Amino acid sequence: MLKNLILFFTILLIFTNQASATTLGQENPDSTYDPNIVTVLLYPAGYPLNEPVINLNSNQQLQLSFDDLNSQYSDYHYTIIHCTSDWKTSQLSPMDYISGYLEGNISQYQFSFNTLTPYIHYNLLFPTEEMKPKISGNYLLEVYLNNGGEKQIILTRRFFVVEQSVTVNAKVSLQPIDLQSSGKIQQIDLNCQVPASLSDEAQQHYKIDIRQNQRWDNAKFNIHPTSLALPQLNFDYPNGIVFNGGNAPRFFDMKSYDYLAQNIAKIIRKENYYLVTLHTDYSRADKPFETYTNLHGNEMITTESDRNPSTEGDYALVNFRLKVPEFKNAKVYILGALTGWQFNSQNLMKYNPSSQEYEGQLLLKQGYYEYWYAIVTPGNPEGNVTTIEGNHWDTDNAYTIYVYYHNYTPEYDRLVGVQTIMSH
């Protein structure tokens, strides 16, 4: 019991501000409101590196998992909330978009085994026959406790339900419209083939969003067709639809605490956790482009041995160090799936004048992780990775295109197409 209490207060003091996560400029973000909830994962069952997208009226399921550092079992409930294309809560009644019960219980849980850090691992597969979405669109998964009839939200995660009615034809252009940015930006050329049943007033009904590597901060929202020659919608903008190419993510291998794997400088075993220090990072802005296979900033919770990573994977406080001059009017963050693609106090780097480097610390479970360093300036919600990481057209990025159709009766945004392409 004493060990658990020491661990709880240690983690709580370090990560008090974890619950402040927000998606800049967007409502209903991916958020974790309880500092004891860590390693929240949501993905199509069996495909842990994929985005949480399922087809409407299919047998596909999403898998939610998370660890609770509180050693006592909690009776967690969940529900789903339909959202507009820009992630506002839709005006539909839950009975309009949920078939079956309006809430469910997370009944699958296991206690950690033989770990320095004790936790309870929770797991949920949904939709189920008892509760599933009736229509397509953007959804928010909400996990909460019912405290005396009062809902206490623990976490929220976005997911997508698609009816694949529209065909998306997309690629990254070999030569962008803006020749001055050639070699740095990646331009998305695309058009959509729409069915006759969804072709009336097409330019008013359709719009698309595009995300790069599952990021929200630099996503392109509300892109409307520029012209149509039915059944084709064209998106031909004068300056193109462009993203900075950026650079391949940095990475470290923490599948084992028994030896120093790639990019790990030191591992110290503490009483209740491991302390891992990465090799000092430096700017790559002026370095030649290097290509290597990567996960586009994703993470894999896994162990090198035959241990079960869900319940036998242990936790470490991971120290990040970045040796660059101080940015006087900007903040530096660690960006990637390991920080939920967010900019908040948890992944904010602090500048140390004595060592002349930025320092940061994250609580992470055993696994393989990728990340970038992003600069955020006041009033600009988009993180800039190019200043520290470099900017190259050659970078291998994943782009996901979401096609929305505004339905009038009933009124909601249907998700009628999702397509992911690789830049190279």
Image (cartoon, grey):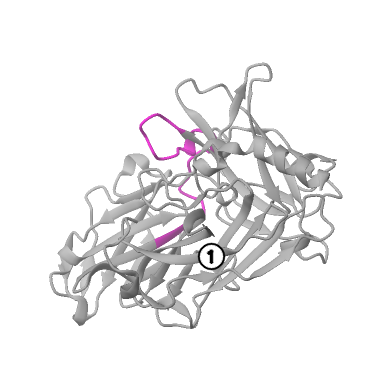
What x and y, as percent, mark residue 400?
42, 61
On the image, which quarter does residue 294 sit in? bottom right
Residue under the point 81% across and 61% down: 113
Q: Nearer the viewer, residue 54 or 239?
A: 54
Evaluate whether residue 49 shows in this view. Answer: no
Q: Nearer the viewer, residue 375 or 157?
A: 157
Left or right of residue 70, residue 168 in this image: left
Q: Nearer the viewer, residue 97 or 339?
A: 97
Q: Which residue is mark 1?
A: 77
Left or right of residue 110, residue 15 in this image: left
Q: As drawn, which residue projects farthest toward the front?
A: 148
329, above or below 275, in the image? above
Left or right of residue 132, residue 402 in this image: left
290, above or below 296, in the image? above
> Could you tell me the amino acid type at mark 1?
His
Magenta span? 376-400
Residue under the point 55% across and 21% down: 326
